[in-house]
Image: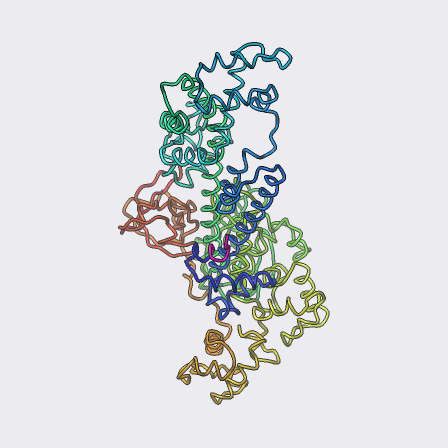
Amino acid sequence: MDIHAKIAEELNIRTGQVEAAVKLIDEGCTIPFIARYRKEATGALSDEVLRNLYDRLVYLRNLEDKKNTVLTSIEEQGKLTEELKAQILAAETQVAVDDLYRPYRPKRRTRATIAKEKGLEPLANLILLQKMNKSPLEEAQNYIDSEKEVLSAEDALNGAKDIIAENISDNADYRKHIRDLTMKHGLLISTAKDPEAESVYEMYYDFSEGLSKLAGHRVLAINRGEKEKFLTVKIEAPTDQIIAWLAKKIITDPQKSTAPVLKEALEDAYDRLIAPAIEREIRNDLFEKAEDGAIRVFGKNLEQLLMQPPIAGQVVLGWDPAFRTGCKLAVVDPTGKVLDTTVIYPTAPQNRVDEAKTVLKKLITKYHITLISLGNGTASRESEQIIVDLLKEIPEPVQYIIVNEAGASVYSASKLATEEFPQFDVGQRSAASMARRLQDPLAELVKIDPKSIGVGQYQHDMNQKKLSEALDGVVEDCVNRVGVDLNTASASLLEYVSGVSKTIARNIVTYREENGSFVSRSQLLKVAKLGPKAYEQCAGFMRISGGKNPLDATGVHPESYDATKRLLEKLDYTMEDVTNRTVAGISKKIRDYKKLAEELEIGELTLRDIVKELETPARDPRDDMSKPILRSDVLEIKDLTPGMVLKGTVRNVIDFGAFVDIGVHQDGLVHISQMCDHYIKHPLEVVSVGDIVEVKVLSVDVKKQRIQLTMKL
């Protein structure tokens, strides 16, 4: 198989683009580096396309390795024909290779192998040829052999049928056709183990749907229901159709005496050998596709969450709510430095509200707090009411926002949090995290395992290695798209920079602590274990404000510094103009990018990127995202009435809709059918995590804490 051509066809890109990308990947370049700084080579492939390309490259290379292993094994058995070799080489999936290898795979002792040991293979072949002059039972008399434990003609005939059944089961073409028929006409059926049991799986207690129509989220829900022993699940295949098709393929003359024997053998082959295997394969395939879809959605949600715009320049009070142990507070300055921490007890059982308000008023006045970041965990509702009452009592213009606490407890109890805040307890660390994840969501959320951030569905049911790799890729793309400040970034943030390992990230921080701030990117080469290759991969994504070279504060890669200087000279600018940001109109001076790129001996795409960076140096791509909604009053679920129109923030997008925070502590669901007037395949076509949307309340169930919303206003 021409892997490059195959990938090009699948991704609808040119073979040359694939070849260039694969060459760079094999040379050890990272996806963010290739996407950003090797646009000429790949024809400007995006990081998303490059990740899909990389995944297919790994799969297809593994497939080629498997084919070689299978071919070698069959050749060693002396059974490799040119036709079989061609079939194996043409196979496009691992399942297809497995089907072709099945007859040659070393088997444990089966009923068929035992029958072969008893010398019954010639009888089986005679029956399959269907050219016998006497009945199969009469022919079977010739194979009675007490030494081989074939004590009767019936014994011999049964053994022959076992051999025929296995031959039918091992036929790759039969298996493929039966799998296709089952997928096309089969049903997935789930029933309740105990119809009286209450569970979240009640809609699947008597459920049936065509395999070809099953939505991924249903597959994941049914699998979990089966795992938790609420559901019994099976595939109902079009058995009569399959048996009739097999009979047509195998029985040449239904009038022959061999026909009933072959019918029994093929029915046994299907019931005992083929159907259970195909049910397993189809269920695995359905799960893998559902898993891939869920991981894709999780990745998109995570990307949107990480790319939320920072709320800069504000002193924030982080509030980690609780009942018995009190609410932990942390005051954080605009740079993320913790100025103060304390604990108040305004919630049950202490209910020391007045005392808490006094503490809060003092903190707001002392530190000029302008924003309160309240976690959405236990006692959040009660804390919010206290905040709203307080804001009415003070003259200062303070607002509050409720932030998703997901992962805060994981972070605050981690080794990383202990190293960062050795003097704080778990609650204080959590409060500081509440504030910081508002000030710079990306810098704070990278400290938490992406799986714990809570923007996916069924993540605990998935292949954890596959999920981690996909989510780490998303974090890596986001960090490199934004860039990091080399002099303030934590090791947790630095380790996601292109070409930087955990060890190198720690070494960068150590170098900074021992030698003071970096004044140029080239200093990175003095960091232990950071060699020329790692420097090439990471330098463009590192930013230094106020350093020796103003280009170090931009996304221009050091390899393009000479070309950038020549560009500035050509257009009558100096490096001082870059420092003073007086090169804003540089693009207007360029008449012909292609010609200028040739003169500067760089690619046209690189030139356009350099110009963009010079015009808007250190521009944060997160500025284009929706800003979070800041609140100053409280709303409760009982205040909601059908028809009420509200603004809300999309918290999570799933296959069947989106959960929207409308400020009542219980996110409302906008079903996919309520998102727009035209048909959409997936909610991600319309909304993303962090989007601010206008919604109308459809229904409210206070008892079940369920809110149904619509975006069709």
Q: What is the basis of the colouring in this image?
A: rainbow
Q: Nearer the viewer, residue 407 or 571?
A: 571
| Residue 128 on image: x %, y % | 46, 24
Work out whether residue 289 can be spotted: yes
- Rendered image quadrant of residue 507: bottom right
Q: Nearer the viewer, residue 526 or 274?
A: 274
Q: Nearer the viewer, residue 591 or 166?
A: 166
Q: Answer above or below: position of 457 versus 9.
A: above
Horizontal side of 589 relative to 530 (left or right) equals left
Instruction: Specify the principal SS of the magenta part.
Output: helix
Is residue 12 within the magenta segment? no
| Residue 584 on image: x %, y % | 44, 81
Horizontal side of 645 relative to 216 (left or right) equals left
| Residue 664 on image: x %, y % | 40, 47
Q: Which residues are magenta?
A: 1-7
Horizontal side of 710 relative to 512 (left or right) equals left
Q: Nearer the viewer, residue 666 or 288?
A: 288
